[in-house]
Amino acid sequence: MIPIPYTWVLILATVLFGIGAIGVLLRRNAIAIFLSLEIMLNSANLAFAAFALKLAYEGHGAAAAAGQLFVFFIIAVAAAEAAVGLALFIAMFRLKETIDVDRFNILRW
């Protein structure tokens, strides 16, 4: 098996993080912002997996296992974020009947 150089995977993770950051900054729809945050979280997950792959090929088994453990915890955090985020979107829609973040300001009376 020919391993993919981890630098290419890190470049992909950087590009995905940039796409997610641009999506967070430019979108006004709460669901689109949420999806952009998920892309950013998955890019960090991909970077952890790339470093775990690099450490596994260098023979550092314990460090590679720690990287894979971080990936597992990030997946768990992403699942919890999805559940809480979707519950917030439902509450926002029931309160204001929109999920546009420009039209929804909870601090305004």
Image: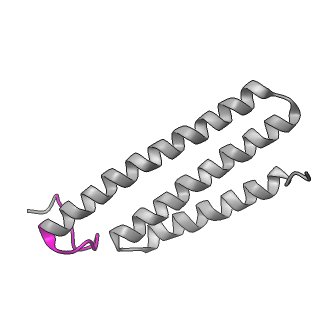
- Residue 68's spot in the image, x, y percent? 66, 37
Residue 101 on the magenta span: yes
- Residue 21's spot in the image, x, y percent? 52, 63
- In this view, which residue lies farthest toward the left? 109
Residue situated in front as seen by the camera: 28 or 8: 8
- Residue 4's spot in the image, x, y percent? 85, 55
Magenta range is 95-106
| Residue 105 in view (yes/no) | no
Residue situated in front as seen by the camera: 79 or 42: 79
Indicate whether 54 appears above or below 28: above
Q: Residue at x 49, y 58 (%)?
A: 38
- Principal secondary structure, stretch drawn in magenta: loop
Q: Residue at x 54, y 57 (%)?
A: 40
Residue situated in front as seen by the camera: 108 or 103: 103
Which of the 4 image quarters holds residue 51? top right
- In this view, which residue lies farthest toward the front? 1
Q: Residue at x 73, y 28 (%)?
A: 63
